[in-house]
């Protein structure tokens, strides 16, 4: 069962800001020794995030790979949770709560103000609460 669910609520509707925040979060977790799985909405989003992890900040380096090529990388990206052992942190950029979410000790949900993101984000918040976990909201200013 997950120990902690954090909702990072961005004040902007810009999808690029959401992806950049996800990259910063993955970088910080990796630097602290965590294994991270970033779940995206689809394979195109996984590919886009793969590219952004190389360029989100000048001089950044986050060892990562899309799941199909991710042998032992500490940060993995995909649109479906892998069957193997769970990472230490699941960053969910998908629209729903994925099956198997409860295998991850920590979950981070990154929500911006896009209407297509806010509504499903609220549903995920309720899902975790109904499962007995009190999500921790973090409202982030620019």
Image (spheres, rainbow, N blue to C red):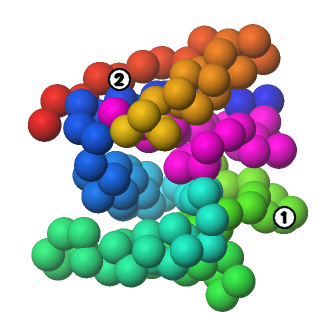
In the image, residue 105 lies at what x, y percent? 67, 37
Residue drawn 60% across the image and 12% down it: 134
**Label 1: element kind:** loop
- Identify the disc placed on residue 63: none
How busy is the neighbourhood of tag 2: few (under 14 within 10 Å), some, or many (20 plus)? few
* Location of the N terminus (image quadrant): top right
Q: Which residue is mark 2?
A: 138
Instruction: Find out whether the residues at labels 2 and 1 contact each other: C-beta distance under 8 Å.
Output: no
Q: Looking at the image, can residue 88 be seen?
A: yes
Q: Which residues are magenta?
A: 89-113
Number of numbered discs overlaid on the protein picture: 2
Q: CA distance from mark 2 to mark 1?
A: 30 Å
**Above or below for 50 versus 13:** below
> In the rendered image, which quarter is residue 72 located in?
bottom right
In the image, residue 96 lies at what x, y percent? 68, 40
Residue drawn 55% across the image and 74% down it: 44
Q: Looking at the image, can residue 28 be seen?
A: no
Q: Nearer the viewer, mark 2 or mark 1?
A: 2
Q: Which residue is mark 1?
A: 84
Q: Is residue 88 left or right of residue 132?
A: left
């Amino acid at each position: 069962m997950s120990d902690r669910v954090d909702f990072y609520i961005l004040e902007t509707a810009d999808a690029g800001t959401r992806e950049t925040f996800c990259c910063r979060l993955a970088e910080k977790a990796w630097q602290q020794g965590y294994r991270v799985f970033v779940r995206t909405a689809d394979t195109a989003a996984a590919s886009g995030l793969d590219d952004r992890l190389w360029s989100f900040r000048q001089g950044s380096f986050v060892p990562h790979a899309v799941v199909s090529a991710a042998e032992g990388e500490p940060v993995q990206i995909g649109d479906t949770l892998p069957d193997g052992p769970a990472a230490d942190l699941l960053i969910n950029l998908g629209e729903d709560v994925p099956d198997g979410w409860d295998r991850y000790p920590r979950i981070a949900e990154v929500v911006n103000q896009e209407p297509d993101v806010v509504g499903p984000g609220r549903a995920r918040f309720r899902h975790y609460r109904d499962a007995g976990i009190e999500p921790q909201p973090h409202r982030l200013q620019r």
